[in-house]
């Protein structure tokens, strides 16, 4: 074998979160939530809600259906050569990949896409060329930070965090940014943060310490979007409260990425973290750190009540008898 064959191509910096596809029967509520509360550019097209943050034609797509959850996450890949490496890695791991149809590509706002079933059964999709729009944005926010870092990040709870982390690290060469220990609802959580590019993290994976349980109904616990100004964030917070959406954590600042944000419950149950000014990672000098607690201040639960605690405890117990799917795991 030649030296060149032994050298693994590093795909770090070649991938970024590009879109989220959600399935819900609450389209009218999603329209009000995304447009009037969060301040995004949102249009209803038949049975589909289209949300824009920037020049990309589609960032958040809500399709009518009973899932009430994220139906797929799409990752924009820098170039065709990098995409081919990703598809080859998935094939070598025995993960089935299928090319998306033209109708599905149009729904997602991309020219072509490829789809696999990722960790926790969440479909993960890859594409190279997004469809752009020169139509003016009509939104309450002044803008959102996307570009080479992508549209934001997701946080996922898992009973099999090692396999979950392995997917992102082995397929996309994600790097560890840092870890957090946090006690929530009487449980100690270990949270690891992975980055795909200069954004501090694109994926966060949380697990309970000791007996692994999953108290979250949805495939993701939250999705983050980053607004352009502090005023955008505080105005969205006020709108969410005035319109009656549940603020799960009030405004605060994180220990690791220093982002100022709040968390609001979406119509489908997972949370949206609406944030401002996280740090960007300096690759030459960054050292992973273990932080105690997710926040330096704030992020206090505002509308998380005893009923929420009991439902989460029941889901955590039920999760013990379910197997969590993870691709290319030897147990599957």
Image (cartoon, helix red, strand yellow):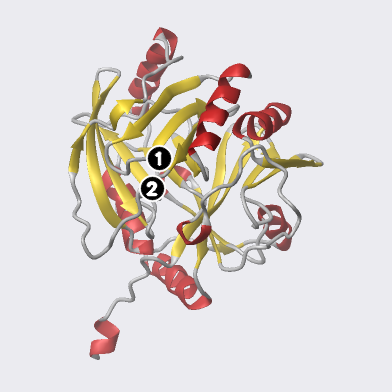
Residue 97 rendering spot, x and y as whole percentages = 52, 62
Name the spot of residue 173 as percent of width and height, x first.
33, 63
Image point (45%, 29%), residue name: 262
Query: As drawn, is 214 to the left or to the right of 149?
Result: left
Considering the image in quadrants, where does the N terminus appear?
Answer: bottom left
Query: Above or below — where is 314 with respect to 154?
Result: above
In front: 243, or 1?
A: 243
- Which quadrant would residue 115 be assigned to in this image? bottom right
Residue under circle 2? 203
Q: Secondary structure at mark 1?
A: strand
The residue pinned by badge 1 equals: 155
Observer able to see residue 117: yes
Q: Residues within 10 Å of mark 1 (few under 14, many from 20)?
A: many
Residue drawn where x is 73% and y is 28% of the image: 28
Horizontal side of 290 relative to 158 (left or right) equals left
Q: Residue furthest right?
A: 46
Residue 280 in the figure: left or right of residue 81: left
The answer to whether residue 321 is seen in the rendering is no
Q: Quadrant of residue 94?
A: bottom left
Name above or below for residue 57 compared with residue 317.
below
Q: Residue at x 71, y 41 (%)?
A: 42
Give the structural element (helix, strand or loop) at label 2: strand
Callout 2 environment at 10 Å: few (<14), some (14 to 19), or many (20+)? many
- Whether pointer 2 and pointer 1 mark residues with C-beta atoms closer than 8 Å, the reply is yes
Looking at the image, is 112 positioned above or below residue 183? below
**Residue plotted at (72% across, 59% down):** 133
> Label 2 vs label 1: CA separation?
6 Å
Residue 319 appears at what percent x and percent y? 36, 28
């Amino acid at each position: 074998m030649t030296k060149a064959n032994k050298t693994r191509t590093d795909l770090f910096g070649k991938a970024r979160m590009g879109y989220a596809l959600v399935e819900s029967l609450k389209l009218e509520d999603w329209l009000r939530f995304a447009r009037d509360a969060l301040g995004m550019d949102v249009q209803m097209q038949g049975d589909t809600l289209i949300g824009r943050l920037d020049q990309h034609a589609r960032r958040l797509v809500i399709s009518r259906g009973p899932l009430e959850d994220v139906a797929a996450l799409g990752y924009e890949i820098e170039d065709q050569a990098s995409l081919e490496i990703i598809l080859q890695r998935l094939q070598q791991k025995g993960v089935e990949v299928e090319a998306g149809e033209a109708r599905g590509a149009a729904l997602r706002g991309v020219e072509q896409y490829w789809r696999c079933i990722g960790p926790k059964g969440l479909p993960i999709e890859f594409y190279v060329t997004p469809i752009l729009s020169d139509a003016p944005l009509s939104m309450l926010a002044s803008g959102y930070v996307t570009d080479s870092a992508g549209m934001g990040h997701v946080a996922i709870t898992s009973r099999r965090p090692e396999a979950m982390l392995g997917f992102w690290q082995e397929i996309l060469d994600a790097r560890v940014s840092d870890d957090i220990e946090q006690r929530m609802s009487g449980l100690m959580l270990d949270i690891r943060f992975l980055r795909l590019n200069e954004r501090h993290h694109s994926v966060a994976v949380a697990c309970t310490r000791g007996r692994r349980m999953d108290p979250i109904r949805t495939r993701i616990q939250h999705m983050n979007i980053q607004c352009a100004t502090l005023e955008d964030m505080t105005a969205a917070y006020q709108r969410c409260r005035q319109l009656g959406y549940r603020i799960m954590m009030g405004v605060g600042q994180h220990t690791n990425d220093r982002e100022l944000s709040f968390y609001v419950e979406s119509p489908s149950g997972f949370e949206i973290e609406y944030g401002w000014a996280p740090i960007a990672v300096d690759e030459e000098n960054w050292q992973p750190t273990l932080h105690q607690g997710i926040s330096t201040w704030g992020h206090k639960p505002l509308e998380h009540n005893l009923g929420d605690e009991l439902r989460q405890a029941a889901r955590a117990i039920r999760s013990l008898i379910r197997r969590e799917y993870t691709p290319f795991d030897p147990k599957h």
